[in-house]
Amino acid sequence: KQEVTQIPAALSVPEGENLVLNCSFTDSAIYNLQWFRQDPGKGLTSLLLIQSSQREQTSGRLNASLDKSSGRSTLYIAASQPGDSATYLCALPSSNTGKLIFGQGTTLQVKP
Amino acid sequence: GAGVSQSPSNKVTEKGKDVELRCDPISGHTALYWYRQSLGQGLEFLIYFQGNSAPDKSGLPSDRFSAERTGGSVSTLTIQRTQQEDSAVYLCASSWLADTDTQYFGPGTRLTVL
């Protein structure tokens, strides 16, 4: 059974700092891995999706990497801004049906 | 284009009442998912629809929960005889294909059972 863990649970950084969020999973036989952002009281916004054959994906200041052999993914945020404050979730499909298993999330606060 | 929409955004009900939650997926998306987000459990899968195939109901917590998807588009999640532990945010997501595509989430319905 796939289990997804995110560390740390919470993170507070000053504006402008580069940071890394971690996601680990127990079963390396994955289809893809998706990173989401959730603002308080809102739904999930998809940030990046990495297919199992890929090593990384980039979107603006965000870079997500995937290492299946070690069961890890990282989300790198460059030059963090207060607007980046949110909860970041990683998720993997449990099967080819795409139903996602989520980590518990990392709540990020970027202080001005 | 329009994203995934859900209604109502908030629902307060009394214990024992039935509730219906609605999801309008992105037009053309064949896969539709329901998830539940609660404080103690995080985000958990409930049910999955793909085209005209039988739904995957493996995540439904009890037989009080059911869902249908009409015409391959709109979906309704029904909770009968609501209990306080059903209080959560119910999220709907859709995607083009099931296993390789990004899932797009709606804003959710916050259900409070008094």
Image (spheres, rainbow, N blue to C red):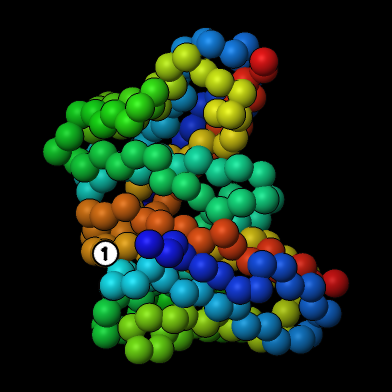
Residue drawn at (73%, 72%) of the image: B11
Q: Nearer the viewer, residue A29 or A75?
A: A75
The answer to whether residue B110 is above or below residue B102 is: below
Position in image of residue A71 (x %, y %):
30, 32
Q: Chain of mark 1?
A: B
As drawn, the residue found furthest toward the left would be A53
Q: How many marks?
A: 1
Picture layout, residue A28 above or below residue B86 = above
Point 27% across, 79% down: residue: B51
Is residue B112 or residue B1 the one in the foreground? B1
Give the quadrant of residue A30. Answer: top left
- Identified at 52% across, 82% down, the residue is B76
* Residue B109 percent coordinates (x, y): 63, 66
Where is mark 1, residue-wise? B96
Q: Amino acid at mark 1?
A: Trp
Q: Is residue B48 left or right of residue A107?
A: left
Residue A105 to residue A20: above or below: below
Q: Dot 1: what SS?
A: loop
Residue A30 visible in rendering: no
- Residue at (47, 47) in percent of width and height: A45
The quadrant holding residue B57 is bottom left
Residue A65 appears in view: yes
Tell me if A103 is positioned left or right of A58 in this view. right
Q: Residue A34, image x and y in percent? A: 35, 43
Would you call the spot at circle 1 few (<14 residues within 10 Å), some (14-19), or many (20 or more)?
some
Note whether B50 is above or below A25 in the view shown.
below
In the displayed structure, does residue A109 sit left or right of residue B83? left
- Where's the C terminus of chain A, which quadrant? top right
Q: Position of residue A51 (x, y in %)?
A: 21, 42
